[in-house]
Amino acid sequence: MDYLGSIQVLTVCKDAAGIAGNIFAFGLFLSPVPTFRRIIRNESTEQFSGLPYIYALLNCLITAWYGLPMISTDNLLVTTVNSVGGVFQLVYIAIFIVHAEKNRKLRMLGLLLSVFVVFAAIAVGSLLMSDFEVRHLTVGFLSCAALVSMFASPLFIINLVIQTKSVEFMPFHLSLCTFLMSTSFLLYGIFNFDPFIYVPNGIGTVLATIQLFLFWYYTKPSTRDSTEPLIVSYSGTGA
């Protein structure tokens, strides 16, 4: 196969992996729906925290920005998945604010404003960098750091599962969607030779694999299909 043919094969594989990652990401986007259905039904945020959705929104905004042509090369599928993810997070945050008590409402509004301020600073600051490579590296490191910290968030759940010897707090579908999405964008990053994508998603794939193993190891056959999440996991995207 000649050089041009190899490039075409890599492009097809990259696009296929990116499209698959976009599809699997919807499982993560929809995972908080039961929580917010309960919030709407009870007209109260109860003991649920809005912080994961605030952090998820910031992560989506930074990573979507990284995927744009003025920041990185040929990463639009990263922008699409994180743009959709950002819309989902905004909807969840809006529902949370509407049904929260006054103090929590004000706090969430303040955090939401902070997210937009931080993102605006990153966007404007990066555009002021005339050198494309410097701009790419700066936003790339920020995006990579956000993704790594996102993928590290399940470590608490993993530790809890090991301590309690129960997967009561770890929904199977969420772990599976995380594994499929992370693996897809791991391949996407490899095919696009982009370490800012394949490194964090490689970490996400390893951690999701551990979660799936723990689910298999600790789940009794009678409860394997009936496990419901009692703790809402972080729902950001991994690309």
Image (cartoon, rainbow, N blue to C red):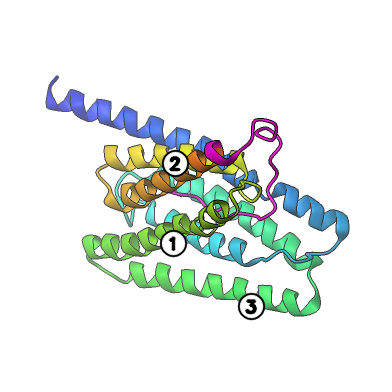
> Quick one: label 1 or label 2, which is nearer the N terminus?
1
Q: Residue furthest top?
A: 1
**Disc 1/disc 2 C-alpha distance (Å):** 17 Å
Q: How many labels sit on residues?
A: 3
Is the stretch drawn in magenta largely helix, strand or loop?
loop
Task: Single out the mark in the foreground, 2 or 3.
Answer: 2
Chain part drawn in magenta: 216-239
Q: In the rendered image, which residue does mark 2 sit on?
A: 209
Amino acid of disc 1 = Ser
- Identify which residue is drawn at 13% across, 27% down: 3
**Disc 2/disc 3 C-alpha distance (Å):** 36 Å
Amino acid of disc 2 = Thr
Label 3: which secondary element: helix
**Disc 1/disc 3 C-alpha distance (Å):** 22 Å
- Identify which residue is drawn at 14% across, 19% down: 1
Amino acid of disc 3 = Gly
Label 2: which secondary element: helix
Residue 235: give x, y in percent of width and height.
57, 52
Instruction: Kindly indicate the quadrant of the structure image that contains residue 223.
Output: top right
Residue 209 shows in the view = yes
Q: In the rendered image, which residue does mark 3 sit on?
A: 110
Residue 102: give x, y in percent of width and height.
79, 78
Residue 24: give x, y in percent of width and height.
52, 37
Q: In the rendered image, which residue does mark 1 sit on?
A: 149
Task: Single out the mark in the foreground, 1 or 2.
Answer: 2
